[in-house]
Amino acid sequence: MADKLCEKLLNGKDQHHDIASIALKTIVAEVPTSNVAQSVLVSISPKLIKGITDPVKVCSIFPDPILILYSIANGTHSLSAIFFISCFSHLVFQDMSIEIKCECLDILCHVLHKYGNLVASDHEQLLMALLSQLSSNQASVRKKTVSCIASLASSLSDDLLAKATVEVVRLLKNKDSKPDLTRTNIQMIGALSRAVGYRFGPHLGDTVPVLVNYCTSASENDEELREYSLQALESFLLRCPRDISYYCDQILHLNLEFLSYDPNFTDNMEEDTDNEYPEEEEEDDESADEYTDDEDISWKVRRAAAKCLAALIVSRPEMLFKLYEEACPKLIDRFKEREENVKMDVFNTFIELLQQTGNVTKGQTDSDESSPRWLLKQAVPKIVRSINKQLRDKSIKTKVGAFSVLKELVVVLPDCLSDHIGSIIPGIEKALCDKSSTSNLKIEALIFTRLVMASHAPAVFHPHIKSISGPVISAVGERYYKVTAEALRVCGELVRVVRPNIEGFDFDFKPYVHPIYNAIMTRLTNQDQDQEVKECAITCMGLVVSTFGDLLGTELPACLPVLVDRMGNEITRLTAVKAFAVIAASPLHLDLSCVLEHVITELTAFLRKANRVLRQATLGTLNTLIVAYGDKIVASAYGIIIVELSTLISDSDLHMTALALELCCTLMADRRSSPNVGSTVRNRVLPQALAIVRSSLLQGQALLALRNFFAALIYSANTSFDALLDSLLSTAKSSPQTGGVAKQALFSIAQCVAVLCLAAGEDKCSSTVSMLTAILKDDNSNNSAKQHLALLCLGELGRRKDLSSHAHIENIIIESFQSPFEEIKSAASYALGNIAVGNLPKYLPFILDKIDNQQKKQYLLLHSLKEVIVRQSVDKAEFDDLSVEKILRLLFNHCESDEEGVRNVVAECLGKIALIEPARLVPALKERTTSPAAFTRATVVIAVKYSIVERPEKLDGFLHPEISSFLLLIKDSDRHVRRAAVLALSTAAHNKPTLVKSLLPELLPLLYDQTIIKVNYFSILFYAIN
């Protein structure tokens, strides 16, 4: 089939060409397997190559003599008619030959795009055939050839790719080539780089200088040559970012030069001056817009330069400072671009610069003069002046682009427009009120208004509220739903702005309350509108009621029932639930008696719904309502809520569990709740809590909520402490049904026991400690599970309360170091360290003394010291100077221990102390990087690893200038030290990349060197085995 179709395409009738071409493309697209594709390609590839390489017959200016003689002999035509028919037949034949060639190229492009790897044996023949077509006189052939070679390039070998590139560059360097052929070759270079990406990098040295030369030396009328050259450079920047680095400065200057390239138009306003006469400016803009020249295509060069500059910004974040110094002023100046499409590209390029600034400087302040954020802040006045001119432009598209720039500016640099709000407000008003404004323009203006209100202090807007509130409120009544929804969101921010503080009345907000309320109420009560508008209206009304409720006394009885009604609608119920949470949290303490009972009933029913997000929102809203209006809620409602809560407590959804337990605590803490509440909690919720405490998944907020729940039971539910303690301790027992308890669950149980004891009072706490120590004194080896839990409970209690009143408790715990069970020894170490946290002056010297004097227990005692140090670093507490001195002396003495476990614990201790005392530790650690003992060097590097945590710490300022001393030990002669340095580098790169960013050029080669297999290590291993 493929053979016959190729035959019809190449030699068939004219009317069969298109049919054969479509059929062949369909076969290529639909071939099911690579085996079938291989056989098809073997059949059609030679024929397609033949169709491409066969020469096109060109019509001569002389007629065909055979045709003339034949016609004269038959006497069928006049001589002039015969001459015309002969020439025309050749022209038709030529056109058909070009058409066939284009069809062959088109089919071959499809083949190579999908099956380029399957015709690897024909790659060279294909490449030679296609390269020859780049010199074709027909533009359509050259265009399709470029696409075809680009499809082939992705599967070419490096040698053939180099051969193709060398040939194209050779053609480019030929000064005698026709301009059309030169443009084609430049397009070919760009297409190659887009197709093969980084593989084109080695050829940039040959191509970039040629393209730059064409840009700068092309004739004034050859705009397309410059455009294609800039497009190719853009492709290099995006696809070969590493190899193009050398040329980036040159490309930047080239782009800035051609960004304002406009030889046919003279602009006398090169300097961006702040004209005090906006009317005259507008007239100037209009006169500039009057210039038109249909033959002027210089705008294509400016557009290509803008896009190339955008590629430079995106791909070179390290050049950001230079870009702000050189490119930013030029871009701002080009906001006045007269061609609208180019202006949009200039706006987009500037937005890319802003986004790159936000990405690179995330977490930095704008007070550092070396930061791009500081440079951006200095440019804000100029940006605003230039943008304000664009907001007065007649073009809707220009205004939309201007608001897009302002939006990104506010996102990247919040609070940067405080001094310029007054100059921007007229542009917002005009965008919202002008009859010629489109929906897109209004949406962009409203989004910017919302963002700028959310990111600036309310007082900034108070002088302009009258100007801005009218257009925004009018926009709420727009017919297009997206405009209405965005206007409602702006109203939400407007509410916060006009009354930011309930107590303070620095601004007279009362005149704006009812207009805002009426506009939103109209939307709230309207049923026939888009869901987005309904949700925005509900959210906004919640904000209005919570902020202005004291001035809406007569309106609330009409408004609140509507919100309750929206809770009954499945589409809007979630939004309505959240709105009531906002209202309930209002400091105005509004009267909700008209709807409160109905709201509680609806919310309780929502706890049974399958929608997880709805249940979460419901739990939060119920919590807020009970805190604020518990005295107005009927007692029977509490019992129903508790019953529903018991079904939500499970380790399958810990977030839901935490919310449910928090609500239980709120219910029990409410003094107005009836005694039946405590009974219901004990009967329905407590069994679920005792079940979840055994879960190995319990952690974080859920564990905190569970601890608070047990404390609340003791405080308010009249629960027997002894019974509750027995229940908790019993959960640690293994059973045939549930099996043993996970280690993590034992820690959870111990924490709950500690909180329970502290809530019960001093006497209960003391008796519990005595009971736990009695368990430790029991020598029965079958009692190991109880001893394990007892040690953990003592540790949790000791961390929260000073246990020094219990004589010799530290000796009782240290006796457990002799246990044959590893988990008990580990728990004893944990307990001793946590008890020391409760009374450092007494127990810390005890631990330090034992570390020095009891070598056999040294590892466990070091773990106890680690617990002390970790707790102190987490709690942001500090040691006294004498203790730090003793700890450091001890730790540094054990840096050279032969046991790797001891060295690791020492390193972690040093790292955590560094978080507490960075000024002392960083120099001490750095000093030991030159120690002759390899273990010491490795230990201090691992200590730095443990000191690098994700959250910001005061250590960062001390470590940043010194971190090279530790990481450069990656080239140390000892493998333990090198491994420690690699681990430290990995931790820094993951948690604090700014610490190592400047060191990467030096560190990466050293890191790559560690991937090389060292043969001498295998030799050592071989001799050791033998």
Image (cartoon, rainbow, N blue to C red):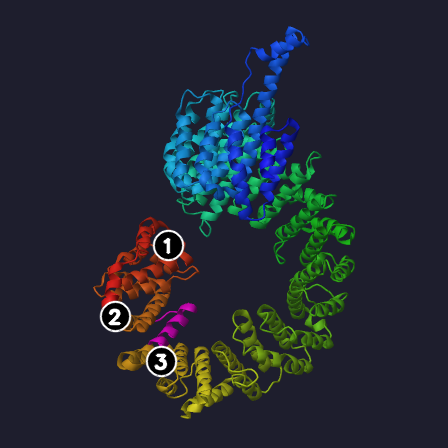
Using the image, tell me which numbered label, if any, was put on residue 843: 3
Please give the residue where the numbered disc 1 appears in the rendered image. Answer: 995
Screen quadrant of the C terminus: bottom left
Which type of secondary structure does the marked residue at label 2 adopt? helix
Please give the residue where the numbered disc 2 appears in the rendered image. Answer: 1025
Looking at the image, is 253 positioned above or below residue 478? above
**Residue 877 falls inside the magenta stretch:** yes
Q: Is residue 282 left or right of residue 850?
A: right
Tell me the kind of residue under disc 2.
Ile
Q: Is residue 975 left or right of residue 106?
A: left
Residue located farthest toward the top when viewing the structure as drawn: 79
Residue located farthest toward the left when viewing the structure as drawn: 932
Question: Does residue 754 appear in this view?
Answer: yes
The span picked out in magenta is: 862-879
Looking at the image, is 257 positioned above or below residue 885? above
Pick whichever of labels 2 and 3 is earlier in the sequence: 3
Q: Crowdedness of circle 1 by 10 Å Cα count: few (<14), some, many (20+)?
A: many
Mark 3 to mark 1 CA distance (whole Å): 37 Å
Tell me the kind of residue under disc 3.
Tyr
Q: Residue at x 78, y 52 (%)?
A: 526
The location of residue 280, given as percent across then percent down, is 59, 25
